[in-house]
Image (spheres, rainbow, N blue to C red):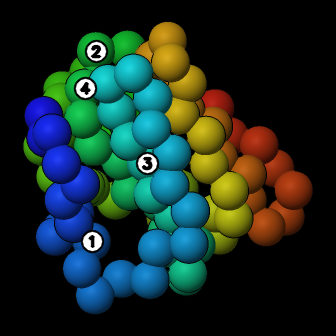
Amino acid sequence: SERRPRRVEALAGRSVVAAAAGLSHSVAVTADGAIFSWGGGKFGQLGHGDEEPRLLPELIEALAGERVVAVSAGQSGFSLALTADGAVWSWG
């Protein structure tokens, strides 16, 4: 945990266009439509197919073929993504 704003260095060099934070996890979308998540994974809210936490942003491989345009991180362990084709994806 940080008490002051700190740049997320693992995303440096990527053009992040959207980000959201839940109670224990965060998600970010880049200009090319990739989606990354990190933080607590107890409910599968990171989208990596397990419940392991991630200390650094990691690409959500299940959505690698999609162009994500918006994202939301719920307070109770879930995430949502909207893709360019109008589909809504949910996990956690």
Task: Give whichever of discs 1 and 3 has the lower sequence position.
Answer: 1
**Residue 50 coordinates in the image, percent (x, y):** 28, 26
**Residue 34 coordinates in the image, percent (x, y):** 49, 69
Q: CA distance from mark 1 to mark 2?
A: 23 Å
Residue 53 disc label: none
Image quadrant in which the N terminus is located: top left
Task: Describe the element under mark 4 as helix, strand or loop.
Answer: loop
Identify the residue position indicated by label 2 in the image: 42
Task: Describe the element under mark 3 as helix, strand or loop.
Answer: strand
Task: Give whichever of discs 2 and 3 has the lower sequence position.
Answer: 3
Residue 25 placement, left or right of 9: right
The amino acid type found where label 2 is placed reads Lys
Q: Is label 2 in contact with label 3 (beta carbons under 8 Å)?
A: no
Judge the density around disc 4: few (<14), some (14-19), many (≥20) Cα neighbours within 10 Å.
many
Q: Is label 1 in contact with label 3 (beta carbons under 8 Å)?
A: no
Identify the residue position indicated by label 3 in the image: 27
Q: Is label 4 in contact with label 2 (beta carbons under 8 Å)?
A: yes
